Amino acid sequence: MDYLTTEQRHKNMAAIHSKDTKPEMIVRKGLWSRGFRYRLNSPRLPGHPDLVLKKYRTCIFVNGCFWHGHNVEVRSEEGEVKSSECCKIPHTRREFWVAKIKKNQERDIETQKRLAEMGWHCITIWECELKPSKREQTLKSLAFTLNKIWLEEHAVIGKPYPQLEEEDGMLKAAEKQI
Ligand SMILES: [Zn+2]
């Protein structure tokens, strides 16, 4: 039996066609609740990053493990590919899937290279890192990384404190002016 009211059906269809896939929503909510603000699917940037944080000069991609071939590696010249735990390449039409996933991987690398050239930081969050057991840790380290990027961009990290003598000199100069 398959009975849905028109409204339910509409809702189901909307959910299916929605761009707000679940892993991306987890990242969005996690960042928002920690006070980070972002833009979505910036069409002007290479690869249309899922989230763009201008203040942090950072693009975030939330990648599905299968389509983007998480931890999948090409083993030999012939294109022999080793599946990974979270990206199992089907045995049927294997060549097709290998070619497709490889192409996506190459595109991802190219996109990140272009963004880096434009001065953007890129962070990739993998779907498997958002499993309930790993979610909190992933969001926590994402927030940590963003804060670190901000501090580095603003050169707060690594800038030496003024030497004591310098401070002394500054004080004396100030005193003279009074
Ligand atoms: Zn994965």
Image (tube, rainbow, N blue to C red):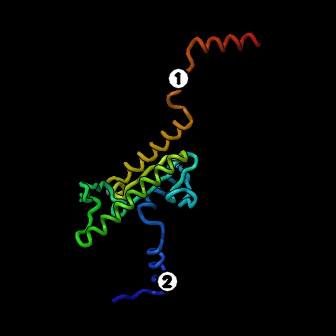
Q: Give the vertical position of 75 relative to 10 (above or below).
A: above
Which is more N-terminal, label 1 or label 2? Answer: 2
Quadrant including the N terminus: bottom left
Residue 24 badge: none
Q: Give the residue pinned by disc 1.
A: 160
Q: Give the vertical position of 148 relative to 77 (above or below).
A: above
Tell me if 100 is positioned left or right of 167 in this view.
left
**x and y percent of residue 174 in the render?**
71, 14
Hey, what amino acid is under mark 2? Glu
Marks 2, 1: nearer the viewer: 1
Which residue is depicted at the point 49% across and 83% down? Answer: 7
Q: Give the residue pinned by disc 2.
A: 7
Q: Quadrant of residue 80?
A: bottom left
The crowd level at tag 1 (other Cα within 10 Å; few <14, some 14-19, many 20+) is few
The crowd level at tag 2 (other Cα within 10 Å; few <14, some 14-19, many 20+) is few
Which residue is depicted at the point 46% across and 82% down? Answer: 8
Tell me if 145 is positioned left or right of 65 in this view.
right
Q: Quadrant of residue 97?
A: bottom left
Which residue is depicted at the point 53% across and 26% down? Answer: 159
Tell me if 84 is positioned left or right of 36 in this view.
left
Residue farthest front in this picture: 77
Quarter of the displayed picture in which ligand 1 can be seen: bottom left
